[in-house]
């Protein structure tokens, strides 16, 4: 009995030993095959047989999926593509780098090669998708970040040219093609018929329109809400709260309501009503009036009106007194001791462009300087971007980190809206809608 047990045990040991022997035999065989493939790949590379060398390294991946093997494949492709920069080689290189990024998604060098190849093949959409995926996958490098930023801020211009435009960045843009006016939405799509003139459109889609018959207050569906037997040169923002809209006639501004009644007074410039007050210019003096036409503020040398025509912007007032611009609260008390030679407007409480001497910088609504004056020209931030001007009068854009992300390519530049479009001038006397290539 004991002898049988001993024999069974010895048999089992023999079987196990045989199994391990087979395992080690196969492992040694695989290792030798792997080493032979690496050696064959190197021999092929020395002979300039790039495709064969790549093929051998690819075969070796079935034995060891090693990052160094992918790096070697990349090195060979660099030599191969430099010698034969064809679409065929480029596509093969892209396919193998795609395999490398799938295996090692945090390895930036593989992503960078793939992205560069897409860009060389004029396929920026795939380059952008790859760059975004690389960063989302945790790949990191200065080069990768730089190329992503370049693609992220790549822009294009719509073909249509305009000679004039008006917008509050509120989802409506009124544009003139030189003959007629029309309303576009924030993305640049047409949302109205054509008219002889269209003023600034308010947040509800209402504005002053002139057709071949008369001037009218229309709503967003172009339904007539009021008619006027007048000819206007310009029209501002219609305030439903006050019921008045500033209109320009015979080179003077007046305030008109839906009943066709005017406030007393004529002005050289007139803003829209905000909290029943509006800023106006009469001669060389700026001041506030209420919605009865009564003066309700001190005089200023200048008052900045925002895109709505409001004297209040970002919760503050920007005005000039005693030869310098200051920031005031809504009670017209100066905030801090900030002063400058000129200012732009404030949009949504963002940083305001200001001028000191012959250079422009940025300040917040509390009067704290964010960027010291350094630009030949600048406009305030809107949607995290701001236009800046070089010494030659050309405009580009910086982002919220003050990095220039759009080159100095434009004769003039406006403000980005929430739909990420912006009016720019690329030719004298005309404007186009600029938009990002990748949304």
Image: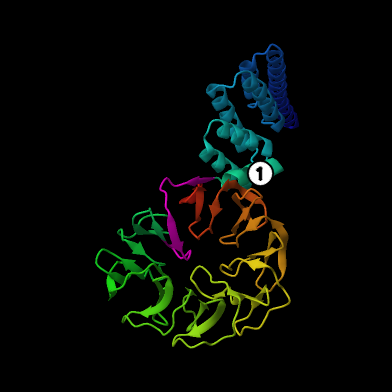
Look at the image and tell me whether residue 227 can be seen.
yes
Residue 95: image location, x then y, percent: 56, 29
Membership of 162 in magenta stretch: yes
Where residue 417 appears, as percent x and y from the top left, is 50, 60
Q: Residue at x 47, y 66 (%)?
A: 168
- Relative placement, left or right, of 327 versus 204 is right
- Foreground: 341 or 26? 341
* Of the pair 200 and 293, the residue shown nearer to us: 293
Residue interval drawn in magenta: 155-173
Residue at 64% across, 24% down = 77
In this rendering, is residue 219 above or below 25? below
Please give left or right for residue 430 compared with residue 79 in the image.
left
- Residue 141 appears in the picture as rendered: no
Image height of 305 relative to 10, above or below: below
Q: Is residue 101 magenta?
A: no
Q: Closer to the camera, 173 or 427?
A: 427
Q: Residue 342: horizontal and vertical position, in percent?
A: 65, 67
Q: Is residue 212 left or right of residue 247?
A: left
* Neighbours of disc 1 within 10 Å: few (<14), some (14-19), many (20+): few
Where is residue 3 shown, x and y percent of the image? 75, 28
Residue at the left extreme of this rendering: 213
Out of 127 and 93, give the one closest to the viewer: 127
Image quarter in which the N terminus is found: top right
Residue at x-position 64% and y-position 48% = 392
Q: Residue at x 60, y 50 (%)?
A: 396
Q: What residue occupies the far top of the structure in this picture?
A: 47
- In the image, residue 78 above or below residue 220: above
Which element type, helix, strand or loop, lies under badge 1?
Answer: helix
User: Which residue, given by chain and number where applicable, does mark 1 sit on?
Assistant: 146
From the viewer's perspective, is 326 left or right of 228? Answer: right
Give the quadrant of residue 109: top right
């Amino acid at each position: 009995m004991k002898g049988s047990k001993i024999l069974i045990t010895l048999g089992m040991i023999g079987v196990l030993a045989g199994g391990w022997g087979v395992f080690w035999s196969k492992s040694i065989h695989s290792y030798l095959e792997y080493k032979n493939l690496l050696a064959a790949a190197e021999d092929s590379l020395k002979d300039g047989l790039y495709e064969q060398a790549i093929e051998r390294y690819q075969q070796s991946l079935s034995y060891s999926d090693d990052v160094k093997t992918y790096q070697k494949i990349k090195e060979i492709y660099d030599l191969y593509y430099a010698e034969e920069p064809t679409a065929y080689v480029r596509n093969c290189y892209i396919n193998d780098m795609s395999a490398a990024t799938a295996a090692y998604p945090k390895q930036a060098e593989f992503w960078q090669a793939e992205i560069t190849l897409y860009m060389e093949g004029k396929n920026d959409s795939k380059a952008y998708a790859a760059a975004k995926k690389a960063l989302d996958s945790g790949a990191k490098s200065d080069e990768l970040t730089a190329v992503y930023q370049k693609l992220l801020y790549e822009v294009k211009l719509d073909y249509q040219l305009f000679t004039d435009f008006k917008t509050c960045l509120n989802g409506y843009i009124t544009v003139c093609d030189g003959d007629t006016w029309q309303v576009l939405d924030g993305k640049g799509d047409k949302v109205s018929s054509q008219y002889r003139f269209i003023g600034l459109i308010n947040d509800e889609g209402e504005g002053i329109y002139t057709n071949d018959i008369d001037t009218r207050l229309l709503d967003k569906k172009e339904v007539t809400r009021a008619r006027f037997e007048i000819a206007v040169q310009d029209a501002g923002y219609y305030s439903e709260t006050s019921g008045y809209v500033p209109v320009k006639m015979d080179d003077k501004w007046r305030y008109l309501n839906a009943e066709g009644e005017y406030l007393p007074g004529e002005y050289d410039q007139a803003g829209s009503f905000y909290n029943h007050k509006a800023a106006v210019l009469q001669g060389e003096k700026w001041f506030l009036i209420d919605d009865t036409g009564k003066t309700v503020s001190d005089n200023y040398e200048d008052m900045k009106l925002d895109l709505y025509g409001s004297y209040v912007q970002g919760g503050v007032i920007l005005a000039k007194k005693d030869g310098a611009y200051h920031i005031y609260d809504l009670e017209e008390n100066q905030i801090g001791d900030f002063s400058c030679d000129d200012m732009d407007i404030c949009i949504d409480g963002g940083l305001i462009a200001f001028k000191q001497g012959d250079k422009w910088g940025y300040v917040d609504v509390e009067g704290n300087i964010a960027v010291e004056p350094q630009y030949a020209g600048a406009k305030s931030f809107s949607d995290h971007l701001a236009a800046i001007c070089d010494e030659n009068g050309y405009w580009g854009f910086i982002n919220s980190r003050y990095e220039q992300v759009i080159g100095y390519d434009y004769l003039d530049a406006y403000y980005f809206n929430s739909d990420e479009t912006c009016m720019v001038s690329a030719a004298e006397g005309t404007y186009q809608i600029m938009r990002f290539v990748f949304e």
